[in-house]
Image: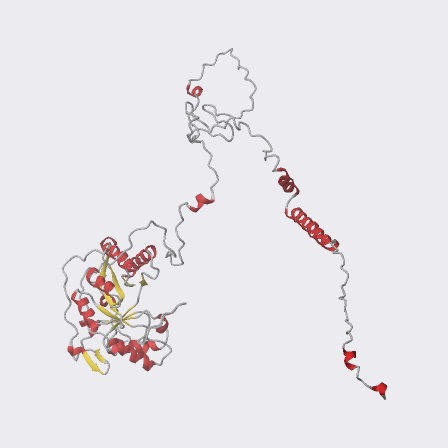
Amino acid sequence: MASDRHDDLEELDEDPVPEIVVEEFKAPRKPINFKPILIGLLVLVLGGGLGGAAYLLTAYDVRDVIGLMDVGENPPKLSFELPGRGEPPKPGVGGGLLTPPVAPGAASSGGEMLKAAPDDTPPPDALLPPAEAKPDARPEAKPEAKPDTKVAVLPPEGGYVAEPESPVSKAFAPKAPPPVDSSGIPSQPNPRSADKPPSYEGLPERKGEVKALPAAPVKEMLKRTAIGDLPMPSPEGKQPWQVYARPWSGPADRGKVAVVVMDMGLDKAATEAAIAKLPPEVTLAFSPYAQSLDKWVKKARDYGHEVLMVLPADMAGTQPRDPGPLGMTNSVPPESNLARLEGVMARGAGYTGVISLGDKFAATEQIVQTLGKLRDHGLLYVGPGTAPADRIPPIAPVTAIADTDLFREAIEMRLNQVSIAARTRGKALVVINPRPLSYDRLLPWLNDFDGQKLVIVPVSTLVQPPPAPGKS
């Protein structure tokens, strides 16, 4: 067992430990292959060149390509040389097609611009009298005409040939008169130079003494209601349309023309101009939507104007206007329309009647009740519509609305048509709107009435009185 002792362990531990060395494995480097890179670059270069060449071949003509290649070396040249190009100008003639003619003795140097106007002076030989012809004289042989490179001389004045009209000259040529519609009214204004537009301040002052109408309203001719005072015939049978009318007496052998200005009271300047500057025979119709109607009506009557109230109603057309909360419309029952009519009548006092341009409403059956209501209150009616003899009030139709198209030619043409109607039928009624241009065209037309054998009258003079009760 002695051999199994481990006394020599320490000696064993002192033995050197063998060192383990691990060598690093390195992969062998391969040389860079530039062949694919060069091939790619070559493909790009060749492809770009071929693409550019293909673009040139497809986008340019062969002559253009040749021109692009040749322009760097050789400057562009004319295909043929123009005669006289580059030569100094000769006195009295042009120096070629590119050189304007020069008058004799004119300086051709010094930087002055040469005039291109042709010289129309005939040559000196043309001023000499013709030589007397000799019996044995033979015509001299003329030398052969050589090609002349001079500019052709224009013929004398009066022998010019007119050049074809250019688009520019056509654009500035005088315009033909504007087209007219079936009634002969121009559809658009004529072109004119800019001038000062009409204004209310530019209207001439009214001539003559201002004579006011009697004070209105008359208390005995008012009926008090919940919505206000309504006009009514007096106990003696007097009608408001007669009591509040402007008296008129004039020649009976002239055509009578009544003028009504609509929508008074909405525009202060337009209303004041109509009251103060238009003739007193012009009738003023006030809008029920205007403010201070009592003051406006009193001022109009103080200047001698007969007064109407505007009755809004449905109108025909592609763009109908909303008549408003007091307007007569087919979309409400007859009771509502009659209540609206009373609302319009209660808005003012001292007026002779109402005017309506609502042709669409007038074509319905409700117009009969409306006209009957006006007859019961003793008022006249201006506008479209009809009713049985026992329900119709004093009525007058409208001949024309002068300023439907707001330009001078159309207004003047419609006023002229009103003059013709007044002369042929004996009476006519024209309506205008409160606009400066309408006033500006109206006043000259009225001032020419003496020459046209016409006379202006208030509306109450033109109405057809209703038949007496019990008569048809």
Locate residue 207 relative to residue 58 in the image: left or right.
Answer: left
Dividing the picture into quadrants, the one containing residue 12 is bottom right
Locate residue 220 relative to residue 467 in the image: left or right.
Answer: left
Q: Quadrant of the C terminus?
A: bottom left
Q: Residue at x 76, y 56 (%)?
A: 31
Q: Nearer the viewer, residue 89 or 251?
A: 89
Percent x, y for residue 345? 25, 76
Percent x, y for residue 386? 32, 73
Q: Nearer the viewer, residue 414 or 97?
A: 97
Q: Residue at x 19, y 66 (%)?
A: 300
- Work out whether 181 lies above or below 224: above
Dividing the picture into quadrants, the one containing residue 173 is top left
Q: Nearer the viewer, residue 32 or 465?
A: 32
Dividing the picture into quadrants, the one containing residue 287 is bottom left
Residue 81 can be seen in this image: yes
- Work out whether 20 lies above or below 112: below
Percent x, y for residue 466? 25, 73
